[in-house]
Image (spheres, helix red, strand yellow):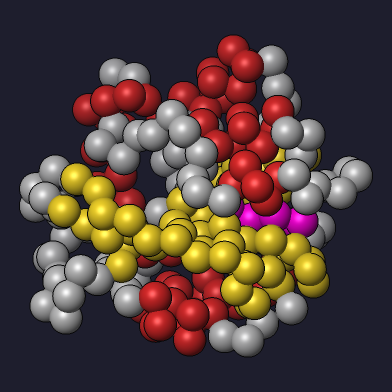
């Protein structure tokens, strides 16, 4: 996966999860609504799980959770968080383009993972999504959008307009809901970004 050194260095500099520039202590939009549709013995996959904030939320909602990240320091924080929350989560160190699972999932959360991938990696990632997510399963995707045609930065998440994201994912992912909002982010990625959140269902 691209940008691995950036993320590893970010975690080295952070004494705690709250020091990370992308840290949020509240769930992504639609996640609270999506977990209400949980069926019995449901399994969830948190891609790029980082410090495990959302993995813990899913585990507390009753999911059997797997959290995947390629930075060991992030997983150390995530394991400490799950222990403090008294929940059991299977945290695995893996690149999302190489991660494999023998079982499928009922819900997949991607809060800022896909938009950190190169175009070649995204193609692999999409094929993985189709193998991971069961038919009828839900995907919550948080992705940087474009403020305007010239909205581009030499570093940080790749900004795709919502039409391109939906076209890229294709007809195998049906739209359940969509939301976009502006957020303040530190320079050089910011100062203002448009964040799109997609609630999708696997056809």
Task: Tell me residue 198's x, y (percent).
Answer: 51, 64
Quarter residue 89 falls in: top right
Residue 191 lies, with reference to residue 155, above or below; the image says above
Location of residue 163 in the rendering, given as x and y in whole percent from the top left corner: 40, 82
Within the image, what quadrant is residue 120 found in?
bottom left
Label count reads 0
Q: In front here: 31 or 129?
A: 31
Q: Nearer the viewer, residue 152 or 121?
A: 152
Residue for point 79% across, 68% down: 136
Of the 4 image quadrants, the one containing the C terminus is: bottom right
The answer to whether residue 195 is left or right of residue 85 is: left
Does residue 70 show up?
yes
For the stretch drawn in magenta, the main secondary structure is: strand
Expressed as whole percent of the image width and height from the top left, the position of residue 161 reads 33, 76
In reply to whether residue 158 is colored magenta, the answer given is: no
Q: Is residue 96 visible?
A: no
Range of magenta residues:
105-109
Q: Position of residue 185 (x, y in %)?
A: 19, 45
Q: Quadrant of the N terminus?
A: bottom left
Task: Judge left or right: residue 183 versus residue 30.
Answer: left
Which one is in front, 53 or 79? Answer: 53
With respect to residue 131, does 22 lie above or below? above
The residue drawn where x is 89% and y is 43% is 41
Quadrant for residue 173, please give it: bottom right
Residue at 46%, 51% in the rendered image: 111
Give me the residue at 54% from left, 18% from top: 80
């Amino acid at each position: 996966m691209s940008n691995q050194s950036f993320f590893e260095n970010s975690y080295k500099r952070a004494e705690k999860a709250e020091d990370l520039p992308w840290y949020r202590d509240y769930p992504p939009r639609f996640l609270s609504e999506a977990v209400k549709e949980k069926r019995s013995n449901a399994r969830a996959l948190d891609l790029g799980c980082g410090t495990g904030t959302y993995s813990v939320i899913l585990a507390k909602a009753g999911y059997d959770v797997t959290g995947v990240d390629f930075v060991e320091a992030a997983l150390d924080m995530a394991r400490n968080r799950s222990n403090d929350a008294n929940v059991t989560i299977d945290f695995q160190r893996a690149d999302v383009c190489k991660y494999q699972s023998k079982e499928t999932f009922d819900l997949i959360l991607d809060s800022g993972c896909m938009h950190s991938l190169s175009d070649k990696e995204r193609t692999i990632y999409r094929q993985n999504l189709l193998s991971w997510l069961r038919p009828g399963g839900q995907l919550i995707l948080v992705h940087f959008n474009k403020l305007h045609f010239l909205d581009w930065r030499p570093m940080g998440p790749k900004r795709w307009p919502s039409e391109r994201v939906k076209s890229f994912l294709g007809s195998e992912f049906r739209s359940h809901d969509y939301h976009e909002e502006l957020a303040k982010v530190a320079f050089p990625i910011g100062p203002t970004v448009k964040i799109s959140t997609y609630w999708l269902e696997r056809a």
